[in-house]
Amino acid sequence: MQISELTCPISRYCGERTPDKLVFNAHFQIFSHRVSTLCALHTNGKISSNEVYQELRELWAQLEPYYRLIANSRDFD
């Protein structure tokens, strides 16, 4: 087992397996892990609210194209 498997675990995808949904799921898991890390750093006083806000905006900007990809597909549930 590698250290990255412990610090950033990736869960199995349980939905309908289409390429778009699998790509979104992978990026969403990375996004959620980073958001969790930012929340922990902010809660412990390591970074300011403004820093968290800016980081969250950047993370959303990185995730949004993948969200739009599945949101615009015909099989989006």
Image: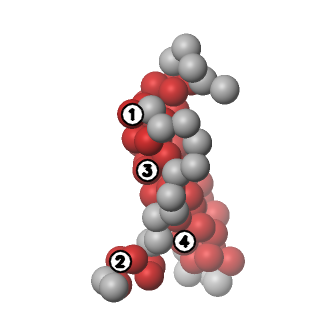
Q: List x then y, in percent, for residue 10.
A: 46, 64
The circle drawn on residue 37 is 4
Q: Would you place residue 68 above or below residue 52 in this image? A: above
Q: List x then y, in percent, for residue 43.
A: 68, 77
Q: List x then y, in percent, for residue 37.
A: 54, 71
Q: Nearer the viewer, mark 1 or mark 2?
A: 1
Given the current orientation, which residue lies at the most extreme top position?
74
Q: Which of marks 1 and 4 is in front?
A: 1
Quadrant for the N terminus in the image? bottom left
Q: Quadrant of residue 41?
A: bottom right
The CA distance from mark 4 to mark 3 is 17 Å
Task: Residue at 39%, 77% (x, y): give it.
Answer: 5
Which residue lies under the disc numbered 1? Answer: 19
Q: What element carries label 1?
A: helix
Which residue lies under the disc numbered 3? Answer: 26
The CA distance from mark 2 to mark 4 is 14 Å
Q: Would you place residue 15 above or below residue 44 in this image? A: above
Q: What residue type is labelled 1?
A: Pro
Task: Residue at 60%, 23% (x, y): give it.
Answer: 76
Quadrant for the C terminus in the image? top right
Marked residue nearer the N-terminal end (1 or 2)? 2
Residues packed near mark 4 inside 10 Å, few (<14), some (14 to 19) or many (20 plus)? few
The CA distance from mark 2 to mark 3 is 15 Å
The CA distance from mark 3 to mark 1 is 11 Å
Q: What residue type is labelled 2?
A: Ser
Q: What residue type is labelled 4?
A: Thr
Marked residue nearer the N-terminal end (2 or 3)? 2
The circle drawn on residue 4 is 2
Marked residue nearer the N-terminal end (3 or 1)? 1
Q: Along the line of sight, which residue is nearer the eye, 63 or 46? A: 63
Task: Residue at 35%, 77% (x, y): give it.
Answer: 4
Residues packed near mark 1 inside 10 Å, few (<14), some (14 to 19) or many (20 plus)? few
